[in-house]
């Protein structure tokens, strides 16, 4: 049987997320509770979390979370990291032995910063340099896989039900201002840890429920810009699209939403002139980054969270608000379990982005 | 040596009412009324099998059948091969043919199947949900820009906007009739797509359809002047044609009459001979100069298309063109039609459009320059499913030539070069051209394209795709059947069952 990445595996899913706009940090306990409610939306073949604001003491350093299949892979990868980065700290990621999660790889964490000489030689900016190094490890070093590479954030994922994965990684011991969670329902997979979600690059992380029909159009287009889709999953290609549009093209998240879940031409035609011209431009310029087919995604980024549905809203997504907290989930029940008294509950329309930003100064 | 005709006219005298419609309709004079015998007879040797008589016979008394008269069976020396030898031995001339390559080469479109949604994502019903077939053609810059006010700036070069990924391909005024041109122009305007003048200039009556017109500049430069170049929405430089890669064109003097001579700016009755190469383009850097000359003369307001025939190193050629200022590359496959071509060239030169498209699209992506240009493909796009497959392989748009002519009545008898087209299309004889009524002709083209658009959106909806952009280059939606590893590799698709 082919491993994930060698074959494309469609999957259904559950997603949940929470963010404190004031930047107040909270433990990972609630997000586990929330995703656990939607147990039936996953089938035990993948679960994971992204947590923002969890490494304040290392907030200037890239936090690499890495899976290793073997000691050899670890040695090779560490040699590579050492050649390109200053390693400020490294350790195993603490886990708890539970019977629901087995066959774990070696899971390590590194806080790093690019070596100034290497960075200067590369003629790249720091983020591009780091992203390139992550791709190098993931495509060239057999048995090593960097699955998280942002600053002051981290991804925790495994094969298993998400609530078990949360307990496995001791998520309750972390404190962050934003969490997203994912439970996976792949139609078939030999179950590889790297294939679980969230998928992340630098500080961008994506959880996604859906199966996009534009996949290969998106993949073949984004690969032209130096990305390599090694997993053949929707989430991976969506992450790269967001990285490309935000980091490389300098679009705002509002504009990104207008590209990936573009308004229909018939809607654009009715817009006031300035809006119309902007949307016509975005759709023409970034036609290949339009995503069709069902999706509900949550994108974590440095300083905020965006939730977005496909333009026909073919997947469920509910938003709940209470004071400084915003909750987003596939099902309302998953919000109510952690916050029964909401100020407001609503379902965003297809293609209507929900963008929550932290108040200034809180994002690291 | 007399050659026995390939097709025979069968008249059912029980049905024939001696109305003489067949006789009137046949410009080849295959039918004759014998007054003495009060009987219509036919001469099979004059029949080109255009089906005009059989289609118009009110009692369906006529059918054209393949002759059973054959030489001794021989898979190596076929009837056709022998007859061609007899003809050439008689005349000493080059064999000529019209329309596209009819020989038995693989049609890859027929060996590719489409995907549809089941369970894990929903198909979309085009009758209930918006379904988008609108496309843009043109170059795109590498990076978005913002103005001083922080707003996104429109830094796109001129784009063509089409309601569906289809255009009518180049067929010159002269090779086809005024009425055929009018039909194409009016249909394009009604459909929101474009047609192409071909290399014979543009009749002044049709300047009003400029927004829907691509004006062509070919090696003969017939009818090319500043007003002409500025009258269309885009300019196409014709470097090659799928039906006859490597050679020029020849419109016989008999077709250079009246307005055609004026439009082409050559004297009446002279042969219009386009040279094989452009004599100001012997290399890629020369092409760049012509592209920019044309942009200068039109003040950079129109995209420039470079049309090439699909030949063996088409990917490298396309890559060169994509770096030379062209906004759109049109590739014409070896099955593409023509008004006249040497038979040996038509049937033996060039490669299938499916393979050319797949390798060009991939090559441009590998080099990171796919967005420098749009890619238009032609050379036997026969149906809406061919369009869908071409787009999924990576095309932005398709050129339709033979299919459009068929909508106007063409029965692919492949004798356009005789100039006596009974359907009023590939002829300049007034009695024949008036048979094509542009009022009805343009409507038939509109019908055909609207039908295809319905089918395209049905197929897209089945795949869960509601915008044509998401189909473009989406090769996972394709599977091959009965193709070998190499073919699958070039097409960049998997085999059915994989």
Image (cartoon, coloured by chain):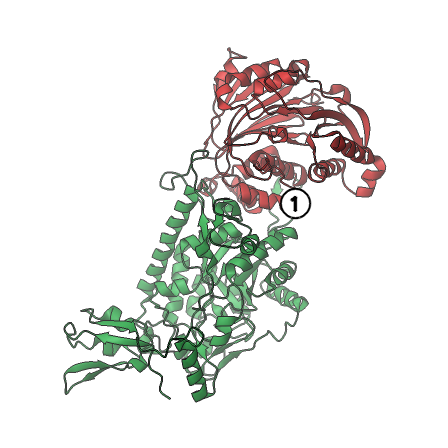
Chain colours: A red, B green
In terms of depth relative to the viewer, which is nearer, B71 or A147?
Answer: B71
Residue B412 appears in the figure: yes
In terms of depth relative to the viewer, which is nearer, A286 or B151?
Answer: A286
Q: Classify mark 1: residues with Cα within 10 Å, few (<14), some (14-19) or many (20+).
A: some
Drawn side of residue B176 relative to residue A364, left or right: left
Q: Which residue ends up furthest to the right in the rendered image?
A: A117
- The number of callouts visible is 1
In terms of depth relative to the viewer, which is nearer, A34 or A178?
Answer: A34
Return the x and y of residue A354 as percentages of the image width and height: 55, 27
Q: Secondary structure at mark 1?
A: helix
Quadrant housing residue A230: top right
Quadrant housing residue A93: top right
Residue position marked by numbered label 1 in the rendering:
A225
Residue B233 appears in the figure: no
Instruction: Give the chain letter at badge 1.
Output: A
Q: Is residue B56 above or below residue B376?
A: below
Q: Which residue ends up furthest to the top in the rendered image?
A: A341
Q: Residue at x 46, y 80 (%)?
A: B95
Drawn side of residue B190 relative to residue B64, left or right: right
Q: Is residue A322 above or below residue B120?
A: above
Return the x and y of residue A44 as percentages of the image width and height: 54, 23
Return the x and y of residue B154 as percentages of the image width and height: 60, 47
Return the x and y of residue A277 as percentages of the image width and height: 54, 44
Quadrant housing residue B423: bottom left
Screen quadrant of the N terminus of chain B: bottom left
């Amino acid at each position: 049987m082919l491993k994930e990445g060698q074959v494309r595996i469609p999957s259904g899913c559950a997603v949940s997320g929470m963010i404190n706009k004031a930047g107040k940090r909270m433990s990972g306990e609630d997000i586990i509770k929330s995703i656990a409610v939607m147990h039936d939306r996953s089938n035990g073949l993948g679960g994971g979390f992204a947590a923002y604001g969890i490494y304040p003491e290392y907030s200037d350093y890239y936090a690499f979370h890495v899976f290793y299949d073997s000691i050899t892979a670890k040695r090779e990868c560490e040699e590579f990291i050492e050649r390109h980065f200053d390693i400020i700290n490294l350790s195993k990621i603490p886990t708890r032995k539970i019977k629901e999660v087995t066959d774990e790889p070696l899971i390590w964490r590194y806080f790093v910063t690019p070596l100034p000489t290497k960075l200067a030689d590369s003629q790249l900016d720091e983020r591009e340099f780091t992203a390139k190094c992550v791709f190098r490890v993931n495509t060239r070093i057999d048995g090593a896989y960097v699955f998280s590479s942002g600053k002051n954030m981290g991804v925790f994922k495994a094969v298993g039900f998400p609530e078990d994965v949360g307990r496995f990684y001791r998520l309750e011991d972390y404190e962050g201002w934003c969490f997203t969670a994912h439970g996976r329902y792949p139609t078939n997979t030999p179950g590889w840890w790297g294939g679980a979600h969230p998928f992340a690059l630098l500080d961008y992380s994506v959880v996604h429920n859906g199966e996009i029909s534009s996949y290969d159009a998106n993949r073949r287009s984004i690969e032209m810009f130096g990305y390599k889709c090694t997993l053949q999953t929707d989430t991976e290609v969506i992450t790269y699209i967001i990285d490309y549009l935000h980091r490389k093209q300098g679009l705002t998240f509002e504009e990104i939403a207008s590209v990936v879940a573009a308004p229909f031409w018939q809607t654009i035609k009715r817009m006031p002139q300035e809006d119309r011209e902007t949307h016509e431009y975005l759709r023409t310029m970034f036609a290949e980054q339009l995503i069709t087919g069902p999706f509900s995604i949550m994108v974590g980024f440095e300083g905020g969270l965006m939730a977005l549905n496909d333009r026909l809203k073919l997947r469920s997504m509910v938003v709940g608000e209470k004071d400084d907290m915003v909750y987003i989930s596939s099902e309302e029940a998953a919000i109510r379990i952690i916050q029964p008294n909401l100020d407001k509950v609503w379902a965003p329309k297809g293609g209507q982005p929900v963008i929550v930003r932290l108040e200034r100064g809180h994002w690291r | 040596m007399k050659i026995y005709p390939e097709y025979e006219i069968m008249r059912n005298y029980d049905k024939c009412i001696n109305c003489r419609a067949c006789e009137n309709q046949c410009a080849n004079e295959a039918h004759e009324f014998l007054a003495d015998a009060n009987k219509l007879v036919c001469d099979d040797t004059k029949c080109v099998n255009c089906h005009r008589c059989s289609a118009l016979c009110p009692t369906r008394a006529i059918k054209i059948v393949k002759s059973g008269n054959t030489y001794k069976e021989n898979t190596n020396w076929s009837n056709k091969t022998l007859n061609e030898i007899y003809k050439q031995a008689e005349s000493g001339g080059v064999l000529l043919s019209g329309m596209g390559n009819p020989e038995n080469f693989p049609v890859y479109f027929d060996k590719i199947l489409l995907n549809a949604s089941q369970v894990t994502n929903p198909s979309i019903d085009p009758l209930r949900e918006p379904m988008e077939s609108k496309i843009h053609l043109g170059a795109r810059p590498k990076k978005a820009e913002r103005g001083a006010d922080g707003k996104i700036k429109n830094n796109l070069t001129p784009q063509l906007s089409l309601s569906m990924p289809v255009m009518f391909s180049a067929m010159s005024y002269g090779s086809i009739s005024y009425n055929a041109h009018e039909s194409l122009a009016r249909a394009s305007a009604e459909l929101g797509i474009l047609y192409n003048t071909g290399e014979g200039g543009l009749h002044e009556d049709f300047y009003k359809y400029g927004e829907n017109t691509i004006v062509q500049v070919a090696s003969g430069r017939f009818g090319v002047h500043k007003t002409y170049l500025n009258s269309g929405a885009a300019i196409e430089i014709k470097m090659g044609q799928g039906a006859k890669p490597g050679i020029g064109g020849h419109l016989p003097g008999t077709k250079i009459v009246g307005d055609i001579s004026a439009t082409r700016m050559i004297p009446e009755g002279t042969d219009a001979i386009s040279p094989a190469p452009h004599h100001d383009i012997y290399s890629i850097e020369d092409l760049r100069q012509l592209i920019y000359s044309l942009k200068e003369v039109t003040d950079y307001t129109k995209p420039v298309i470079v049309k090439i025939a699909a030949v063996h190193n088409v990917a490298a050629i396309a890559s060169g063109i994509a770096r030379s200022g062209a906004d759109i590359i049109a590739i014409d496959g070896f099955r593409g039609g023509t008004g006249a071509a040497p038979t040996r060239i038509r049937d033996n030169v060039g490669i299938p459009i499916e393979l050319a498209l797949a390798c060009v699209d991939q090559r441009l992506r590998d080099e990171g320059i796919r967005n420098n240009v749009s890619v238009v493909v032609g050379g036997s796009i026969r149906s809406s499913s061919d369009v869908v497959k071409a787009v999924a392989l990576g095309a932005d748009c398709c050129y339709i030539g033979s299919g459009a002519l068929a909508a106007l009545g063409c029965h692919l008898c492949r004798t356009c070069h005789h100039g006596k087209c009974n359907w009023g299309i590939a002829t300049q004889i007034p009695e024949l051209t008036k048979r094509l009524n542009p009022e009805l002709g343009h409507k038939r083209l509109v019908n055909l394209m609207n039908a295809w658009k319905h089918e395209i959106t049905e197929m897209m909806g089945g795949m869960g795709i509601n915008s044509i952009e998401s189909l473009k280059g989406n090769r996972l939606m394709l599977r091959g059947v009965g193709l070998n590893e190499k073919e699958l590799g070039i097409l960049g698709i998997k085999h059915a069952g994989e």
